[in-house]
Amino acid sequence: QVQLVESGGGLVQPGGSLRLSCAVFGPSLEYFHVGWYHQAPGKEREQISCISSTDGSTYYADSVKGRFTISRDKGKNTVPLQMDSLRPEDSGIYYCAPCGLKVDEYHDWGQGTQVTVSS
């Protein structure tokens, strides 16, 4: 069974940067695709990025394209998310989980990590 643990959130000013990390406990990153999901206050959780286990190809939602970068560290079994040029609308809780989930039907979410973008 896989366990994913998020970390790295915090308070940052607009235009600033944060680096989130998803630690994967259990299967190696080679065996499944890992995604990052964002839940803004009062809104539904949505996938914003994903990285493939097979070829490292990536997906970004339009809202973060060009500002966020997902990667994988096979040695540490982690999936970092580098977030640059942050905006107030990027605030919320960030979760990592397998890619392509139907968020309402998945029940193994971690605690997530809180990001607040505010001056």
Image (spheres, grey):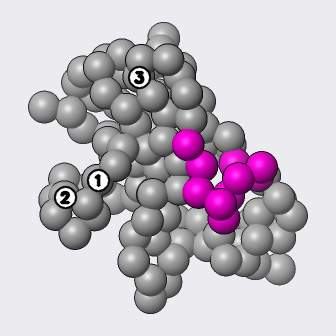
Residue 81 in the image, given as x and y percentages of width and height: 60, 42
- The residue that appears at 53% across and 48% down in the rendered structure is 49
Kindly identify which residue carries mark 1. 101
Verify CB contact (< 8 Å) between mark 1 and mark 2. yes
Amino acid, disc 1:
Leu
Kindly identify which residue carries mark 2. 106
Residue 51 in the image, given as x and y percentages of width and height: 49, 33
The image shows residue 81, relative to residue 32, as above or below, that is below
Instruction: State which tag comes first along the sequence, 3 or 1.
Output: 3
Secondary element under disc 2, as helix, strand or loop, is loop
Residue 40, magenta (yes or no):
no
- Quarter of the figure with the N terminus: top left
Left or right: where does residue 12 sit relative to residue 109?
right
Amino acid, disc 2:
Tyr
- Alpha carbons under labels 1 and 2: distance apart: 7 Å
Kindly identify which residue carries mark 3. 53
Disc 1 residue crowd, few under 14, some 14–19, many 20+, Cα 10 Å: few
Amino acid, disc 3:
Ser
Magenta-highlighted residues: 59-68
